Amino acid sequence: MTTDLATPDPATAIHAAPPPLAEPSGWHEIRLTVNGAPVTAQVESRLLLSDFLRDRLRLTGTHVGCEHGVCGACTVLVDGEPARSCLTLAVQCAGAELRTVEGLAPGDAPLTPVQRAFHECHGMQCGFCTPGFVMTATALTEQPRRPDAADVADALSGHLCRCTGYRNIRRAVCQALDERFDGGDAEQGE
Amino acid sequence: MSHGPSPAPRQPARGDGPWTGRPVPRVEDDRLLRGNGRYVDDVALPGAAEAAFLRSPHAHARIRSVDVTAALAAPGVVAVWTGVDVAHLPAMLNREELRTPPGLAELLDPYVAITPMPLLATDKVLYVGQPVAVVLAENRYLAEDALELVDVRYAPLPVLVDPDRALTEDAPLLHDELRDNTAVAVATKVGDPDAAFASAHTVVSEEFQAHRYVASPVETRAVSAQVDPYSGELTVWSNTQTPHRVREATAHTLGLDPERVRVIATDVGGGFGQKGILYVEEMLVPYAARVLGRPVLWREDRNENLTASSHAREQIHRIELAADAQGHLLAVRDRITVNFGAYNMTGLVVPYNSVCHLLGPYRVPHVDIDVVGVLTNTTFATPYRGAGRPETVFAMERAMDRLAAELGLEPAELRARNLVGPDEMPYATGLVDRSGKPQSYDSGDFPELLRRAVAKADVEGVRARQREGARDGRLVGVGFAMYIEATGLGPFETARIDVAPSGRVKLAIGAPSQGQGHRTSMAQIAADAIGVPFDAVDVVGGDTSATPFGVGTIASRALVNAGNATHRAGRLVREKIIEAAARRLGVPADGLDLREGVITSKTAEEQALTLAELAGRAPLPGTPEPTDGRHGTELSETVHFRPPGFAVSSGAHAAVVEVDEHTGETEILHYVAVHDAGVIVNPMIAEGQVTGGIAQGIGGALYEEMIYGPDGQPRTGTYMDYLVPTSSEIPDLDLDEIHSPSPMNDLGVKGLGEGGAIAPQAVLANAVEDALRPFGVVVRRGPLSPSRVRDLLRAAGRPTAAG
């Protein structure tokens, strides 16, 4: 070895070919909708939805915190329902309609009431868990009727936040629900 | 759970100053809410190889052989390196933390054993999770596939998990070059503690254990690197709390000049101390980027974070208090054992913090403390939010409750009798602080903190309910805990201010943010110091190219150090602006004022000049040469603020809990925190910091524990078994605050990032013990999970629910 960095010979200096398959079962072609835009892609069967969104589509607002479905940071809406993108395979989403945090207020569009509530209530600090919370809260505001306090508590318990101590997140979700269901069921939310 | 009413929308950030003291909404949020965060793994580096680390499955073993042939042949693999391949790189990490401050060395002569951690293990592994090899491949899937093909043969060695056992004569030695498994040792004395114990009315002796838990930021650690083919500069993206230290260490490891290395830590998804130290992965990724000549990315998974990133908290305190008949403390003696894990990564930082925070807000004439840090076959332990203080407060505040029980006093009353008064400030404890100077509390009002906490906790109500007896097996209890925290650790922090030709102000600070909102609070300080609108200030932090020097955001130090550096730089820039305007307008400088970015004459209002008009005088062709040779773009200042000593924050927490005698479950009925962090710059951000700290403390008190089997195998390696509290477990908190400005800095601020996390373990243990008082239970360690509470009840002869 002549280099002072003691290089093991990479032997692959040129990468003209596409990267090798992540696994041998081959590619699947999927068609789906992401934030309203049609997407066609070749994916391996084991490719996680979170990696598909982040690495292939460069939608990096969806974050990965645990890769085993506990922290909730990777939550996106699949056909309107919150789903853990780290526990979902991209191939499972063929034909689905996906929404990620980037789809809520694209470009310079005004923040949605949920996003605004997180800002106004200081419901975020480092911001890493925030997109997951925001997507779950967005799904709550899109229910036909106001979800009751137990539903809200249940939805929030699927997300970990290490910064805020949760109080301001609860306030933010409450504010967004108030705004959406103003004059709704008085028993709710508190 | 009560969530309280929705608050009114916060005031927008407009209008004249002062900005300091206002809950200005964060400028960080909009970007983060749109998914435009820039965390390490979000930075696109086309053509990047991805790294995966092979980690030891053994807690202690010799490496007999490593065969990478099959892994190298696997699809998409670019390189596989073992310890031998990187043995030529220097292994020393965290050199600054391992250095004993000169004052401390002179006065206490501490023992510090240096145990450099190899970048990849060569002959021995010392904990489960230690990096043994690294695979670089076209993507992470392929890199992880290849990990399974690396063939390592180990010869297991006897395992040490228990720090007491590690100190016995016949214990196996972890590091062959050391005399024993001691990592650090230091002892200190004040007065004549032996005589005080001999003459005391009452002595309590107890053993308390702070259990091991983990910072566990939601964003795991990550690092990527790229050599710029044009400039040759090595750029490293790392989610570190200390980018300048990463730059120095990377340059040292790779044999580069630090100026050729740029470290960027823009958005960081929580740090809490875990990202405040240097790791081998952080060195190997830039190394790989240089060797391979292509970008390299590594992102840790959660199992790695729980088992192989630093742990914290595990300490044993054998503590004794001596008191007179009225409960006045005469002396404290404590023998502290700290489990360091396999390597000494941060030397005296945690152990000595535990020593010099043990006395807390109490007046103690005679003191005898020693501490030993012990090496064991567990993941290395380093500072985590509070850094040695939650552990020591747990021991002291538990001991205070045992003393109160012995004397038949209300715990709050015992505390009140021993508090240092506000008229005694600054107060010298007789100990030396972490920098080696005589320890001094700069300001504070401890009796007022306690008075407010007691008033909110409704002790009488709890006592009345206790007299009535348990309802349906539900037992109520109240607990208190107090703390002091030396904040604003030096040696310095940097702020650089530049006024751009447009009149906008660029502020660069050395301390990055991991969610603390520096872009907002530092802009508030700068706007006030200079006299410009808040939204004319842009703040850059976490990029070593923006300030030549910096320390970082650790140890409740950013607001004190970066804040005061910003304030001073802002005042100096303001002076320069006014001098330049005076020359331009031909009037004396003392006749001018600068507010909201406009320089006006105090006498003739028509003589007004905007900052843009002043700063925009660039030396373009046709522009008249300034007579003094100065141009607008030179409205710049760089300040390194060096704090003269620690700013001491303080607090009193109280908790009312209800324990279910049958299930062992603890419910927090009321949590009170009264704190004093001097002047508050942004009350909204401050409250968020306090609340978040308390939530982490509650997690440690009731749920979180990193558990090892006797074989050194971690048993809590996922979020399924390492229990981080969710929204359902953290109640709304009852917060109050007082403000004793620090005389140690111009702004009067004190650090508060860690404070919230210091008291919860102690206060909840005290409350649970109070609830279980009918059964004579003593709480000696946490977390107070339902199963541990049931263990306590069973040991006291109470039948509990099965399971």
Image (cartoon, coloured by chain):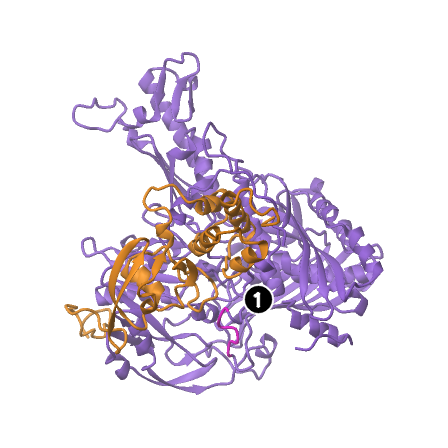
Chain colours: A orange, B purple
Q: Residue B721 location, x and y as percent?
A: 53, 72
Type of residue at label 1? Glu
**Alpha-carbon neighbours of circle 1 within 10 Å: few (<14), some, or many (≥20)?**
many
Q: Which residue sits furthest front?
A: A144
Q: Regarding mark 1 in the picture, which secondary structure is present there? A: loop
Q: Looking at the figure, which quarter contains the N terminus of chain A?
A: bottom left
- The chief SS type of the magenta part is loop
Whether residue A145 is situated above or below residue B469 in the rendered picture: above
Is residue B188 something one can see in this rendering? no
Is residue B658 something one can see in this rendering? yes
Give the residues in magenta.
B713-719
Given residues B578 and A88, the one toward you in this image is: A88
Residue wearing tag 1: B704
Q: Residue B498 location, x and y as percent?
A: 34, 36
Does the stretch in magenta take in B716? yes
Whether residue B575 is situated above or below residue B132 in the rendered picture: above
Rendered residue at 43%/48% (across/down)? B511
Q: Residue A39 location, x and y as percent?
A: 26, 59
Whether residue B254 is situated above or below residue B563 in the rendered picture: below
Residue B613 sits in quarter: top left
B492 relative position to B679: left or right: left
B494 relative position to B653: left or right: left
Chain letter of disc 1 in the image? B
Q: Residue B362 location, x and y as percent?
A: 71, 52
Given residues B624 and B136, the one toward you in this image is: B136
| Number of residue marks | 1
Given residues B534 and B602, the one toward you in this image is: B534
